Image: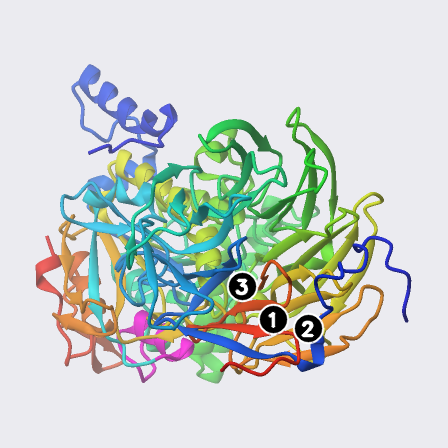
Amino acid sequence: MRRDIGCAKVDHWLSRRSLLAGAAAGTSLTAGLTPVQAEQLRSGQKRVLQVYLQGGVSQFESWDPKPGTKFGGPFRSIETSVPGVRICELLPHTAQRMHLLSIVRSINLKTNDHGVGRVFMEKGRKNGAFPYIGSVAAKYLAPANPPLPGYLHITTRGLNDNTAAFLGAKYAQLKLPGADAPENLERPKQLTDEGAVRREELRQRLSQRFAGGRGQPAETEAYESSYEMAERLLAQKAMFKAEPSPAELERYGSHPFARNCILARNLLMNGGTCVKVTHHGYDTHAENFNFHLEQLGEFDKTFCMLLDDLHHAGMLDSTLVMIYSEFGRTPKINQRYGRDHWGASVSVAVGGAGIQPGVVVGATNDEGTEVADREVDAGHLFHTYFQAVGIDSSADHEIAGKSIPIGDPVAAPIEEILA
Amino acid sequence: MSQQIPDLPPPPPAARRPVDVPKTHLFAEFKHERPLTTCRIDPTGRYVFAGAEDFGVYRWEIGGTSEAKTVFAGHESWVRSLDFSLDGQWLYTGGYDDHIGVWRTAASGSDVAPERMVKAHKGWVRWVRVSPGGDLLASCGNDNLIRIWRLPDFQLVHELAGHERYPYAADFHPDGRRLASFDLMGVIKEWDLNSGAELRSFRAEFMWGFDQKFRADMGGARDMVFSPNGATLAVAGLTEVTNAFAGVHKPMILLVDWETGEFRQQFKDEKYNGMAWGVRFHPDGFVMGVGAPQGGNQGKVWFFRPGEEAAFHTLQLSHCGRGLDLNPDARLFAVPQFDGLLRVYRMTDEPARV
């Protein structure tokens, strides 16, 4: 087992410093962490890291390789740090960290549609106005006064989904367009501190009057939430403005996904509750193999650096990590060396909080054309994710006197992957 | 518009009658159960070999039956590049398993094992090509390197570093002193085979595209070959990428004046979306290219004369063509197809065999 292959010395700075500080002072393990991290660890707060491989990563070229079979493609499988578990050779860094992750190989989404698949994977239901994982996490996992908006989505593009549904705008995703600081984060230069306070008081008075007079609390709440999110981001502006160090860029890479993952790490370490990073470019109807070489080549090491940093900071036990797509790709390789949309035999990887590491759940048949054992769908995954972070997914949201099941009652957690 | 063709070889010797392209007809057909990826005819003209979307390389006698197929098994991934020693005794195969296979071309039996597997690159071996003198072999790898090997012992002579993205293909200049290579980004490099030094680098940017939506590069040569006298380099690939992930682009065959680096001709089929997978100079003075469409199954072979915008003849294939090779007397050519058929065509008015 080669756990730290690919790590620079700086990888271990946090954990080593923590341990040394703790040993020298006889204090807790949280010594040496930032105040926010220390509070997170003390409080037992759970958080979520979603890595969304947009477009549909191929299960053959990632978590469920079938080398030498009819539809297996050109890539080989490699051993991982978990004996007997093999993944595609495009993920050599991830393979060395397989003891931190688990795989579900038996997902049948029964859809080949991007939109339906994405919504199903996010909401655990195909239909209906239900909140996304990130919004549910923001509502139930974030502390009372979080230092950052509860659901942050780093993406260079994407749809403006209504992720919060009936939970309200306060829990909606806030999209960050990459690692650059959000626009208009700076207060206007001519506005003094005192002026800013007075402006905010005026805004609150107007909001209260509007809410009272028109009886539109939801609309007012949306505005209030926007201001709250902006205020929280403003307080963290230094984090956005800080350029990654040369050592970080050496480890993570210098491409946009690398910078986005560095930001994701910083957000999680500074009070982020659910942080989603989207890596685009997996909808490979043509040149599937060349594009997976490129895309997973970018994903593999970068993701592992992020995983290492969370692990070495002692945060992995309290951070659920999900790597997923809206579906997988067809077994059949088309005439353009592409693979098309496929929801019938899909895989995801998951790890961290509440997840038993090194487990493989379910199996597809020899050619990967269908699930052969332990069929599950996104409803089961949804339950599993929330059970893993300590939320009873069979309980209800209590919204304005209505009880709405958190997870789809027809599905259940995948118990064998839960710690 | 027609122009002089200064680089093409002199008229064919009297011993070989010119071909009659419009009379091109199917001569032989061989069937494999998986899609084919490439093909070559051996220097004796006896055999045709193909790679496939499995781990085998397959041999048929051109005069034989489809059933009499010999399997060359030893790679652990797909093979998409083949070449031979000058005397045809040895077959070299470039595999996506990082290895070059060395095989006896005429080995007997229905299953043939490699004489040797050479770990050639870290990552796919995309290309193998034997030098005009037969003493060197060039390989292109996903480690962004081109390696020059001395044959037959595979002693490493040069490691040519300079491509920043995958080099897709390479060919030796007929003078034997230089090598040309072409990468994902359309960068063409010329290398000195004595010193291993890069002599020049220029870019056919139009044979590359950046997909803004998916933020990915699409390009590269699917085949490349020098004209017999070395005046022109022909490259098969793509142009006008509008959606890389759906394969929406046009096939292109580029002719480069090798001394000046001028892009002398960019042959396109305006009514066709897809990829050009093969190109050959025919000794009768024309160029042949093969293509696969983005949609549907209408593969094509284009016959065009350098300097003329339109093909003077087009052959419809029964499915997507993925390569092209001529036999030694240039009367036959072979095309491997996506549907698993390896088809051999004859460019004469002789009676059809199939």
Question: Is B47 drawn above or below residue B342 in the view shown?
Answer: above
Residue projecting furthest to the front: B15
Q: Which residue is mark 3?
A: A157
CA separation, marks 1 and 2? 8 Å
For residue B247, side relative to residue B13 (left or right): left
Q: Viewer-nearest of labels 2 and 3?
A: 2
For residue A320, side relative to residue B131 (left or right): left
Q: Amino acid at mark 3?
A: Arg
For residue B44, side relative to residue B75 (left or right): right
Q: Viewer-nearest of labels 1 and 2?
A: 2
Name the element at disc 1: strand
Q: Amino acid at mark 1?
A: Gly
Q: Is residue A117 magenta?
A: yes
The chain under label 2 reads B
Question: Is A3 drawn above or below residue A232 in the view shown?
Answer: above
Q: Which residue is mark 1?
A: B291
Name the element at disc 2: strand
Mark 3 is surrounded, within 10 Å at the Cα level, by few (under 14), some (14 to 19) or many (20 or more) other residues, namely some
Where does the image place residue B294, in percent across and percent down from the top left? Answer: 56, 75
Where does the image place residue A176, in percent across and percent down from the top left? Answer: 51, 56
The chain under label 3 reads A
The chain under label 1 reads B
Is the Cβ of the residue at disc 2 closer than 8 Å to that at disc 3?
no
Residue interval drawn in magenta: A112-130
Q: Which residue is mark 2?
A: B302
Name the foreground residue: A157 vs B50: B50
Residue at 19 percent across and 56 percent down: it is A389
Res. A206 image quadrant = bottom right
Residue at 41 percent across and 64 percent down: it is B60
Name the element at disc 3: loop
Name the foreground residue: A53 vs B308: B308
Q: Is residue A141 visible?
A: yes
